[in-house]
Image: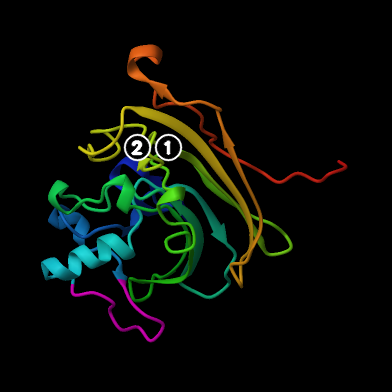
Amino acid sequence: NLLICSGRHQSAIFGVNVDSGELRFIMANHEDWSDEFKQYLLTPVDDDGVPLYDLTSPGGIDAADKNFWTWGQHNIVEIPNDEPGILEFMVFDNGNYRSREDAKSLLPLDNFSRVVQFKINLNTMTVTRPYEYGKTEVGNRGYSSFVSAKHLLTNGHLVIHFGATTVDEFEHTITAQPGSSDLVDPDEGQQALGRLVLQEINKETKEVLFEAMVTSGYFKNEETNGTNYRYDISAFRVYKMPLFA
């Protein structure tokens, strides 16, 4: 009987025993944890249980950071599974930094946000990733450093909103929070336009069935709009409602 907790600012997902309050697992980058917590860290494996990364090497750590772990995540929703010791959930992986080191972090222009499904085996303390969408299919135009979510419909489709994407006057992806949620890009422009990228996709085929982009309609800058000009438009949650309720 587990409570799944999302530590967005720790870029970690925790499992807590509801009855005892004891920690059961930590799904996160393996660096910087004290000895008392290391026993709870999950190991990424493939479908055959073979480790995907050498987490004792810098290259393996970086590969796991860029491709497996979630960063600044939102919207964890459990997927029913009756197998003993097995836990599944979907989450929106925002992707902030994708490293604990600035030197290895990604700029917004090189980054992405995605929807990910994870399957945790509590018996072996391992985790697999059966599904992801967004990294290659949407790329940096969907990168959202905060908010955003996904909604799994009863017909199996996914409604996804990349809820805080931002571009400069050159149509380059930038962040709404330079130096806070992301590295500062020295080559970015001086103006910002917020966008909401909304999609409905076939989860199995990843075919885009519907897409809409919502913007505020004009670029903003610090001189005219103040220091928070990048906070232009965003959405925390988006749901598809029946046409006739």
**Magenta part of the chain:** 44-54
Disc 2, disc 1: CB below 8 Å?
Answer: yes
Q: Nearer the viewer, residue 81 or 12?
A: 12
On screen, residue 26 versus residue 78, left or right, reads: left
Q: Secondary structure at mark 2?
A: loop
| Residue 154 pos. (x, y %) | 73, 60
Which comes before the other along the chain, label 2 or label 1? 1
Which residue is at 46% across, 49% downward? 142
Q: Quadrant of the C terminus?
A: top right
Of the residues shown, which amino acid type is indicated by label 2? Thr
| Residue 96 appears anywhere in the view | no
Left or right, residue 204 beside residue 56: right
> Would you place residue 172 above or below residue 19 in this image?
above
Membership of 192 in magenta stretch = no
Q: Residue 89: where, in percent of width, then height?
A: 51, 61
Name the residue located 31 percent from the left edge and 40 percent from the top edge.
9
Against 111, is 173 above or below?
above
The residue beneath circle 2 is: 175
Determine whether the residue tagged by mark 1 lies in a helix, strand or loop: strand
Q: What is the three-letter code of the residue carrying label 1?
A: Thr
In the picture, the disc for residue 166 is: 1
